[in-house]
Image: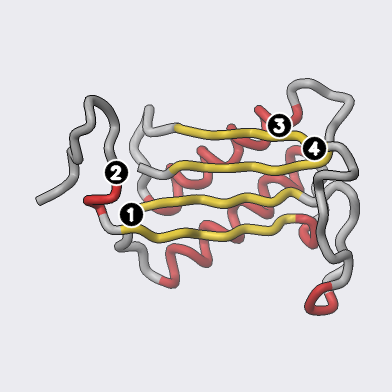
Amino acid sequence: MPLVRVEIKKQHDPTYAKRIGELIYAAMHSTIGVPRDDNFQILREHDEHHFVFDPNYLGIPRSDKLVIIQITLSEGRTVEQKKLLYKTIAESLNTELSVRLEDVFINLVKVKKENWSFDNGIAQYAL
């Protein structure tokens, strides 16, 4: 059960953020086994005063087209699976939406399964 947050600078195309989310979901499905219909995303666009980043951190040249992706998911994926996820997301955003590879910033937040409640105040995954 991943929860995906996407942060981008305000775009002229009202479908742009949704298309980013669709590509991320497809990558999660194909690389880390996220089931069909397990798709929860928060897609936000910001003006230039509320989207702050270092344009050269770690020597990586970033542009105003930066896409910041944070995925909260249950523990259990291998380093290899995570690397494949990063690569698949970056390459699909590049191929489908012309996002530069340098402009794809991904952060995974791993949590224990008991840290999810899907409804009714119940921890469905708690053992």
Q: In which quarter of the image is residue 34?
A: top left
Q: What type is the residue that disc 1 sits on?
A: Ser
Identify the residue position indicated by label 3 in the image: 17
- Report the mark closest to the observer, 2 or 1: 2
127 is higher (above) or lower (below) than 59: above
- Report the mark closest to the observer, 4 or 1: 4
Q: Which residue lies furthest to the bottom in this view?
A: 58
User: How many numbered marks does the figure carry?
Assistant: 4
**Camera-nearest residue between 31 and 19:** 19
**SS class, disc 4:** strand
Identify the residue position indicated by label 1 in the image: 74
- How far is disc 4 from disc 1 in space, using C-alphas? 28 Å
Identify the residue position indicated by label 4 in the image: 46
- How far is disc 3 from disc 1 in space, using C-alphas? 24 Å
Q: What type is the residue that disc 3 sits on?
A: Ala
Identify the residue position indicated by label 2 in the image: 116
- How far is disc 2 from disc 1 in space, using C-alphas? 9 Å
- How far is disc 2 from disc 3 in space, using C-alphas? 25 Å
- How far is disc 4 from disc 3 in space, using C-alphas? 11 Å
Q: What type is the residue that disc 4 sits on?
A: His
Residue 36 lies, in percent from the top left, at 36, 31
